Amino acid sequence: HPDTLQAGSQGLQKPPCPIVKNSIYVPPTFISPQIVEKSLADYSRNPLYRYLYGVFGETETARLFILYKVGTSNKWGGSTVYWQTDISGNVRTGKIMLYDSATGHRVKEPYAYVGWAHSELRLSNFHLRQCLFGEHLLNTSATAPVMLVESEKTAIIMSHFIPDYIWLATGGKNGCFNSEAMQVLHGRDVTLIPDLGAAVQWKEKARILSGIAKSVTVSDMLEQIATEEQRKQGLDIADFFLFSPTKRQMLQLMIEKNPAVQLLIDELGLELIE
């Protein structure tokens, strides 16, 4: 786990530094695959996994976590690690975040529970160059259109609801929204879906993709359908999809109201058909 592993050469892969003209380009440092793989476990201690388990079920939640390479950290008694895996399969870093397993929302009190794997590992001479979260999925299709959102959690959830697109995340309103990180979207059809309240800022940032992406669209769909209260909350597209309860969520509500339902399911060996 990112906060318990000892720093050392086994956790650090440093490619050579090529010289560009009169200056030295310092390439990103990578975190070893062994550390990442070790974190892809203990999901029963991962609050976000437990929340999505109640929404999507075990099979689908496990698939999404492995697809996006989402790990578990011991930090704060169990938290989520969003590994940033680039298009070449190298891991740049991992963002560690704490969630409420009941609501799926981030825990922000009494402070923001956000950390970084490279800091927890105490890797020396670490040079961070962030990439898009989910970037490695670009290798699954050379032509699939890309949906770009702010939150890593949103990318994961929307990949379930609308799997025909490649869902990537910048890691925040600003995040790694810069020219260097956007180069991997060369020749792609890209749609930006900002959280409520960030549409104007993202329309400005969309200029970065000019000359890189094949086409760029900034969707204001959420702004058109949101209520004033939803705007104040700064909801994102995943929130709107989750507002409509799934069959599994409805079944869970039935069980909470009447535990005998669960006994009936177990006795008859019933299985929910989504």
Image: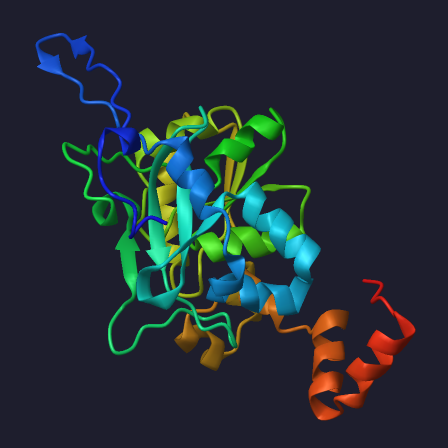
- Would residue 161 be visible to someone looking at this image? no
Q: Residue at x 44, y 24 (%)?
A: 88
Residue at figure coordinates x 61%, y 29% from the top left: 140
Horizontal side of 64 relative to 71 (left or right) equals right
Instruction: Point out the image quarter for the C terminus.
Output: bottom right
Q: Is residue 251 above or below residue 26?
A: below
The spot of residue 4 in percent (x, y) is 29, 51
The residue sitting at 60% across, 24% down in the picture is: 142
Q: x%, y% of residue 254?
A: 75, 85
Residue 25 sits above or below residue 252 on the image: above
Q: Quadrant of residue 66?
A: top right
Q: Is 27 situated above or below 20?
A: below
Q: Nearer the viewer, residue 230 or 161?
A: 161
Residue 124 falls left or right of residue 78: left
In the rendering, at what x and y percent does residue 198 appear?
38, 59
Which image quarter: residue 105? bottom left
Residues 193 and 66: in front is 66
Residue 62 makes an appearance in the image: yes
Give the residue at the far bottom of this rendering.
257
Return the residue found at the far right. Answer: 268
Q: Position of residue 32 (x, y in %)?
A: 35, 31
Residue sitting at the far left: 22
Displayed quadrant of residue 109: bottom left
Q: Residue at x 42, y 75 (%)?
A: 233
